[in-house]
Each structure stands twice: as structure tokens, then as C-alpha cells.
Image: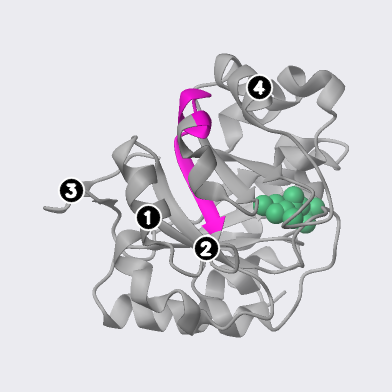
Amino acid sequence: MTRETSTPEGVRTLAPMRSSALIAPSILAADFAHLGDEIDRVASVVDLLHIDVMDGHFVPNISLGPPVIASVRKQTDLFLDCHCMITDPLRYVDAIREAGADGMTAHIEAVPDPIPFLDSALDVGLEPGLVINPPTPVEAVVPYLDRCSKVVVMSVHPGFGGQAFLPESIRKIAELREIIDSGGLRTDIEVDGGVDLQTAKPARDAGADILVAGTAVFGAVDPPTTVGDMRTKLESSERP
Ligand code: DX5
Ligand code: ZN
């Protein structure tokens, strides 16, 4: 993602509420045996790639790590955003950056004091962000929003793709939108989990800037067409 301004502290920032939502497919739902082809298929129609890193400790599942990120880096120039569902994100900042990632997000539940993580990620050139799980209130991340390129609202319980969107996530997105706008902040709001042709627009209307969609994109018969259909829905004035 191209950042537009730079604060004295060096946090690269974006204008509040993007004029169009960004679509970020999660490669967790791709066929890993043909990952390069899967990425190539959607590369021209999406805005960034969402890469789910799971350690089998913070979440019960294990997914992928720096070697796969490095392979993806060779495959595409898209912004690579690593969603780290791991117990010790600070420990992996350098490895994630060296693998070629552009952004790294960590869970506030894993790093109750997230400043060392956020500062460290920024220092090595990663756009940092924080993620909140469904039970976690938005207040948990509010003190750190000015240091975050993005804040991620989990709209499913982390660990697995293919779950249904939790409707209460809409309220959390709206709360963050209000806090970010009223504070004059430039933090992007991302929503992750269960985003599909039905849930994308309500999430966008509540204030989400970035929509992560795994199963809805890579599980589709024709992923590029599905991304196009999602953009059409986002731009329509119809209620879902
Ligand atoms: C869940 C992951 C999500 C997931 C999204 O732990 O963080 O990024 O891959 O996949 P879908 O769109 O299938 O919910
Ligand atoms: Zn994710």
C-alpha cells in the first residue's frame, strides 16, 4: 500500500476512511500446492495479500512462516500483510521483514504492552498494526492507534478460515471508525474473517477500509470475477 504522509515519528499514515475499500485475499484459503498460480490469478484485481501466520500456541492451528512468505515475495509485488497469530510477535519481527513482508500485525491479547512490537516493526520498515479478537473490546487498542498503520477487527475467532462472520463485529468497526475520525487519526480499519459477498458491504458501511476475504475469494470457482462482484456490491446503494 502506498503511504501518503509521514509523521515526525516516522509512522507512515493514510487518509481517514479510504474512498474505496481495499480487498485483501487471505492465502490461507488458497491451494498451497499451487500457491504461485493462485496468487497470479488474482494479483491484478486485488489491493494487497493477507498472510496468516499461526504458531499452534496462540491459536490451535499451524499455518506458515517466513520461508513461505519469502516464496510469495518472489512471486508478486503486491503489499504483503502478515497477520501474526503468534504468542511472541516481537521475536519474529526481523524474520518477517527479512522474508519480504511489508506489514505485520499482532494481537493485543498476545502483547498487552504492544509498544515494543510496534516500534520494532516500524524500525525495520514494516507497517505495524494491532488485532483484536471477538471478545476483546476496542478500548484495548485505542491508546496505541496513533502508532498503528492499521487496526484489525477479527470477525471470526482466529485460527481457521471458512467460519461465519460474527455480526457483532459491525459495532466494533463502527466504534473504531468514530474514534479514529474524531481523533483525526489516519489508522486504517481492517476486518478479517467471514467476509464474503453478503458481509463485505455491511462491514464497509460501518467504516472498514480493508476487507480480508479468504474462502470467498480462493474458494470461488472464478476468484477474479468474485473480487469484481464484491467491488460491485461495495459500490451499490442496495442493502445486502
Ligand atoms: C482466521 C484468519 C483469516 C482467515 C480468513 O484466523 O485470520 O484471515 O483466513 O478466511 P475466511 O475469509 O475464510 O474467513
Ligand atoms: Zn487473518
Give the labeled residue for mark 1: 116
- Segment colored magenta: 95-106
Q: Secondary structure at mark 4?
A: helix
Q: Quadrant of the N terminus?
A: top left
Q: Residue furthest top?
A: 74
Q: Secondary structure at mark 3?
A: strand
Q: Residue furthest left?
A: 8
Q: According to the image, what is the colour scheme of the structure?
A: one colour
Earlier residue among tags 4 and 1: 4
Q: CA distance from mark 2 to mark 1?
A: 9 Å
Nearer mark to the viewer, of 1 and 3: 1
Q: Amino acid at mark 2?
A: Val
Count of numbered circles on the image: 4
Nearer mark to the viewer, of 4 and 1: 1
Q: Is residue 229 left or right of residue 44?
A: right
Tell which of 142 and 167 is nearer to you.
142
Q: Position of residue 211 (x, y in %)?
A: 60, 56
Tell which of 166 and 59 is nearer to you.
59
Q: Quadrant of residue 94?
A: top left
Residue 6: mark: 3
Is residue 121 at all visible to an observer of this figure? yes
Tell which of 75 and 105 is nearer to you.
105
Q: CA distance from mark 3 to mark 2?
A: 26 Å
Q: Is mark 2 within 8 Å of ligand 2?
A: no
Residue 111: mark: 2
Q: Position of residue 72 (x, y in %)?
A: 62, 22
Q: Position of residue 196 (x, y in %)?
A: 75, 59
Mark 4 crowd level (few <14, some 14–19, many ≥20, 10 Å Cα): some
